[in-house]
Image (tube, rainbow, N blue to C red):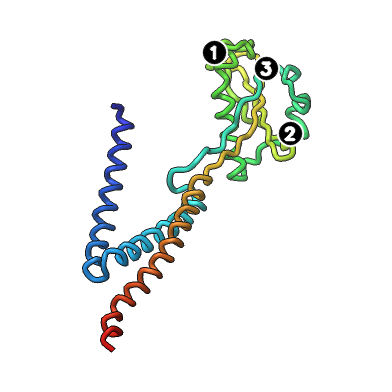
Amino acid sequence: MGETTIIFIEGIAATACAIIVFCGSIWLLLTLVTGARLAYFIVASVTFGVLVILGVVWSLNPLGPVGALPKWNPVQYADTVDKINFGPASSYPDSPWQPINKNDVKEAQKGSLLESGGSAGFGDAINKGQVTVFTTTSQGLINSDLDRFLDQGSTTYGMVTFKAVTGKGTSVALLKYDPGNALGPPRQLTGLFVGLFVLHLFGLSRAERKARRAATAPEGATT
């Protein structure tokens, strides 16, 4: 059993114990006063209400586990621009390709991801013979001054240039931006929490009315 699996099991066990201890103890105390059914709906409604609040915050800010993060997928590597099978590549690095605005935090982060994506596939491109100028990844580094973006409809493309660490020689790479869906799973869970919260509020209302009728029934029977 791997260390990651052990940590996962321990996390599940800790979460289950926390729910049993904290929610279970409150439910047990309320049961002595209100009865098991009403106590359950009270505790569950409060719990799901808190989860809705946390879920909303989680859905707006990636503070916890998230879905697929943004990334750049390599499309093609080549020694020269004219070997890239993409029409606008012939204009690189000039217009319509746009340089990265490094004063814009979001755009600068996007540019950093572009370089990471280009570097990640550089070794495979060399091994597959798409890049022949370099024989190892250590021979080429990305020239950040030539990082470029190009928006075509709803799709964003990027191009980077690898320059030789020593001597001469360059190669280029075309990449496609994948925005991912980082906040998708948090929002789906938040929607589930909202649904469960509404259902338990409805159940709480019915359980409370039933408890009131049960409490007043003996008096009504004697009159």
Q: Do the residues labelled 3 and 1 touch (CB within 8 Å)?
A: no
Give the quarter of the image for residue 148.
top right
Would you name the residue on which mark 3 appears? 78
Q: Which residue is drawn at 54% across and 16% down?
A: 137
Label 1: few (<14), some (14–19) or many (≥20) C-alpha neighbours in 10 Å: few
What is the number of callouts on the image? 3
Q: Is residue 207 left or right of residue 170?
A: left
2 or 3: tag closer to the N-terminus: 3
Could you give the CA–CA distance between mark 2 and mark 3, rounded to whole angstroms? 18 Å
Q: Do the residues labelled 1 and 2 touch (CB within 8 Å)?
A: no
Q: Is mark 3 on a helix, strand or loop?
A: strand
Label 2: few (<14), some (14–19) or many (≥20) C-alpha neighbours in 10 Å: some
Residue 6 lies, in percent from the top left, at 29, 33
Could you give the CA–CA distance between mark 3 and mark 1, rounded to whole angstroms? 15 Å
Residue 73 lies, in percent from the top left, at 60, 28
Q: In which quarter of the image is the N terminus?
A: top left
**Three-letter residue code for mark 1:** Thr
Q: Which residue is drawn at 30% across and 47% down?
A: 15
Vertical placement of residue 76 versus 188, above or below: above
Q: Nearer the viewer, residue 76 or 11?
A: 11
Give the quarter of the image for residue 214.
bottom left
Q: In which quarter of the image is the C terminus?
A: bottom left
Q: In this view, does 69 lie to the left or right of 172?
A: left
**Three-letter residue code for mark 2:** Trp
Could you give the CA–CA distance between mark 1 and mark 2, rounded to whole angstroms? 28 Å
Would you name the residue on which mark 1 appears? 136
Q: What element carries label 2?
A: loop
Q: Nearer the viewer, residue 14 or 123?
A: 14
Residue 90 lies, in percent from the top left, at 78, 24
Q: Is residue 206 left or right of residue 188?
A: left
Would you name the residue on which mark 2 appears? 97
Q: Is residue 208 left or right of residue 107?
A: left
